[in-house]
Amino acid sequence: MEGKIDLSARRQVTNKLRDTYGKASKTDKARILDEAQAATGVARSTARRLLSGPRLPDPAEQVDRRRLRPRAYGDSALELLAHVWKLMGMPCGKYFVVMLPGWLPLLLEAGDLDHPFATPEAIHEVRRMSAATVDRYLAPARAAFDLKGRSATRPGLLLRNSITIRKAGDELEDVPGMLECDTVAHCGPTLQGEFARTLTMNEMR
């Protein structure tokens, strides 16, 4: 018995012998099994199973259906999807599909869809996208707009030691003017440049 061969060659041999094996007599089947064993190096029971079973695709011919399946949406539809999504304020997929019927006529009327990619076919494709499909195709764009909050304050040892921090279990002072204050910097992902700050004050009575 010769050494085992690779999967592609093994399938080619068994596929070639399969038709002959199915029509052969018992004596001829034994001979064909010997040939298959010698050519592939597999056990006799395995050779019998390969020859009597359905034809197996040659790995060289086998295709990945997930990769070669035609895309359901064209490039224009995906470009239109990202464009409309930004104009709508970058909602999640579930909100997007609910908002889209009301937004599209307004965007068309305002001229916001006067672009080469906003073809009738592309608009139709975007209309029929599900929420999950919208989220899947917009994942790269959403990641690019993933804003990270910035803190505009730094812990100071002097302040920490001089200001008492109220704990959740502490009793509240029953007098006017006891406030908790905090600032919010409306700076987006960077502290550079000019931006507004908000001072939030809560009376703790």
Image (tube, grey):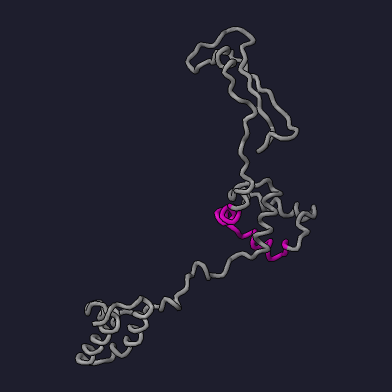
Give the magenta part as a residue range: 117-139
Foreground residue among 154 and 18: 154
The structure residue drawn at horizontal position 58% and vertical position 67%, both measured from the top left corner, is 71
Front in this rendered view, residue 165 or 100: 165
69 in relation to 28, above or below? above
Q: Is residue 127 magenta?
A: yes
- Give the farthest residue toward the top: 175
Inspect the magenta stretch and tell me whether residue 175 lies in it. no
Q: Residue at x 62, y 30 (%)?
A: 151
Q: Nearer the viewer, residue 179 or 13?
A: 13
Q: Position of residue 152 (x, y in %)?
A: 65, 28
Compared across the picture, whether 112 is left or right of 169 comes to: right
- Left or right? Give the position of 62 relative to 193: left
Can you say which quadrant of the picture contains the C terminus? top right
Q: Is residue 57 left or right of residue 121?
A: left
- The N terminus, quarter of image: bottom left
The structure residue drawn at horizontal position 23% and vertical position 92%, both measured from the top left corner, is: 28
Residue placed furthest toward the left: 27
